[in-house]
Structures are given as C-alpha cells and as structure tokens.
Image: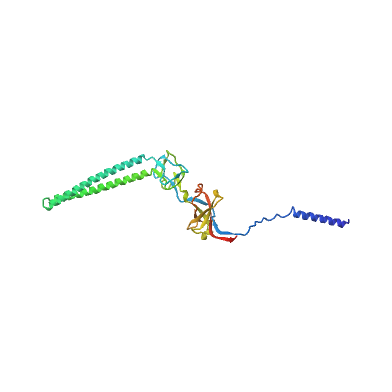
Amino acid sequence: MSRWSKRLLVLAAVLVVIVALRLTVFRPSPIPVTVHRVAKGRVEDTVVNSRAGTVESRQRSRMSPGISGLVVEIPVEKGQAVREGDVLLRIDDTEHEAQVNLAARSVDAAEAAAERACLSADQAARELRRAESLAAKNLLSAQGLEEAQTAASTANAECAAARERAKEAAAALASANAILEKTVMVAPFDGVVLDVTTEVGEWISPSPPGVMIPAVIDVIAPDSLYVSAPIDEADVAEVRVGQPCRITLDPFRDRAFDGTVTYVASSVRTEREDSRTLRVEAEFLEDELPTNLLPGLSADLEIILEARDDVLR
C-alpha cells in the first residue's frame, strides 16, 4: 500500500470519528414542543386581580360593652354558633337593678303627687264656679271672686307641674332601664363567635373617644362572605358590576367558586404610585360554602369580560 493510500485511510478514519462524535456526544439537545389537538370549546377574555384579594364578611360585629362593669357570665365560646338575641356576656347588674327600682318608686310617688295636685285643681275649679255664681247675684265681693280665681289658677299650675314631674320620673326610669340593658350583650344577628377576649371576673370598660380598645366579643355571619380584591388601573374601563367571575382560594386549590361582581369602586387607589389599583367586590353564588372558608383568607378573582362557546381553540 502506497504512502498516499495510508494517508487517505487515516483521514477517512478521522472523519468517521468526527461524524460519530457529532451525532452522539456533541449532538444538540432536542427542542421540547407541546402539541395540542385543535378542537371546539369555550374561549374567555378575563381580567385577574393585581394582588391577592381577601375574603371578608358583610355582617361582622366587634362588640364592646356600653358601660363599665364586672363580667359575671360568658355563656358562649369561640367557634360557637349563635342566634340573634342570644346572650353573649353579662355584667354585674346589682347596682343598676337597684337604680331601676329606685326610679320606679320615684315614678309611683310622682304620679301620686300629680293625682293629688290635679284633684286639688278640680276642687279649686268647683270653688271658682260657685264664687262666680255668688258674684253674679251680688252675694260675693270682687275680692272674694279674685281670690277664687287665683286659687284655681294656682291649683291648675300645680297640677301641670306635678304631671311634668311625673313625666320626668318616667324618663329617669327609662334611662335607668336603658343602662340596665347594657349589662347584657346579645348577638345582633345569626352567626358564629370568632373570638372572646375577656374572662369572668374581669372589669371591662367601653372605648373612650379617640382610644381604640380591642373588642370583647367578635361575631360574624358566615353566610355573608364576599371577596375584595384590587384590579390594575389598566383594566378599569372593562370591569362592570354584574360580570361573572371565578373565585379561587389557596386552601381549596382543586376547585373554583362561581361568583359575580357586586361593587366597583368609584376611585382608583393611589397609595402606591407605581401600582394604582381599583377595588372590586364579588359575592359567592353558591348557597352552601365549606365550613372552613373563613374571613381573612387570601383569594383571587378571575373576572370574565367576554366568553364564546363552541369555537376553535
């Protein structure tokens, strides 16, 4: 074999090795491709919230006492369902009950005094009529007639004053009863007790003006939940009350709740210059929600602006 033949064989072997390496070791990675079969279905144009929304309740009462007092009874506990009018807390009412009894006795006394004064006024009126009859027959002097008229007028004034004092006593009784009623806190609606921050034997007081004191009892109606969420200002022109939406929550990732937009704010929030948002609210359309769907959970809204069915997608 000649020298040139050997060189050609070596060159061919090198080329074979290069090609083999190119097809194996240095082969480029394949580009992944996702393939979908074209079919007809539903296509939607949607808007989503720019930041996480929050589940809230339209009926929530953070209750504090109307008067100061010593807690003597708390017949409810956290998580307990209550009906409207159920007693939630009682304050010692001994002193206030005594004030009501005292006011009631004052009413009785004032009414009796008014009755006596008015009976005297009736008697003075009869005396005046007799005096006028005698004066008409010239059997009574003018001075005697004037004295009878003065006595009748005085008696009428005393009767009117006594009746006003009776009304004043009745008002004092109503005030005492109003204060007595404040010793009992009752549920303002059907709901669930979220929190109780006091104990029997503690002294509680109402919040003074300008000073925030935590609520003693927190009650919420779980059937009045809604979602409040911010929408980017770029989507303001497209969002309307009544539009359908889907509500998703982290604890229920395997399902979406149907909802409808019930409120669109009338102004854009400008607290953050770099991210101005519009607050919208949406209510759940489902009648029965999970028992562990609670206020405070984060939520996302997907507002459906337009939808078309049976189109290629």
- Horizontal side, residue 101 vs residue 28: left or right: left
Q: Nearer the viewer, residue 24 or 202?
A: 24
Q: Nearer the viewer, residue 296 or 255?
A: 255
- Horizontal side, residue 127 vs residue 93: left or right: left
Q: Check the image and report above or below for 240 versus 61.
A: below
Q: Check the image and report above or below for 183 versus 29.
A: above
Q: Check the image and report above or below for 69 versus 285.
A: above
Image quarter where the N terminus lies is: bottom right
Residue 100 shows in the view: yes
Residue drawn at (22%, 49%), measured in percent from left and top? 156
Residue 80, how many percent across, how many down? 46, 43
Image quarter where the C terminus lies is: bottom right
Q: How is the image coloured?
A: rainbow
Residue 56, how many percent across, how many down? 49, 50
Residue 197, how many percent across, how many down? 46, 42
Residue 271 shows in the view: no
- Horizontal side, residue 122 vs residue 251: left or right: left
Residue 61, how many percent across, how many down? 44, 48
Q: Nearer the viewer, residue 18 or 23?
A: 23
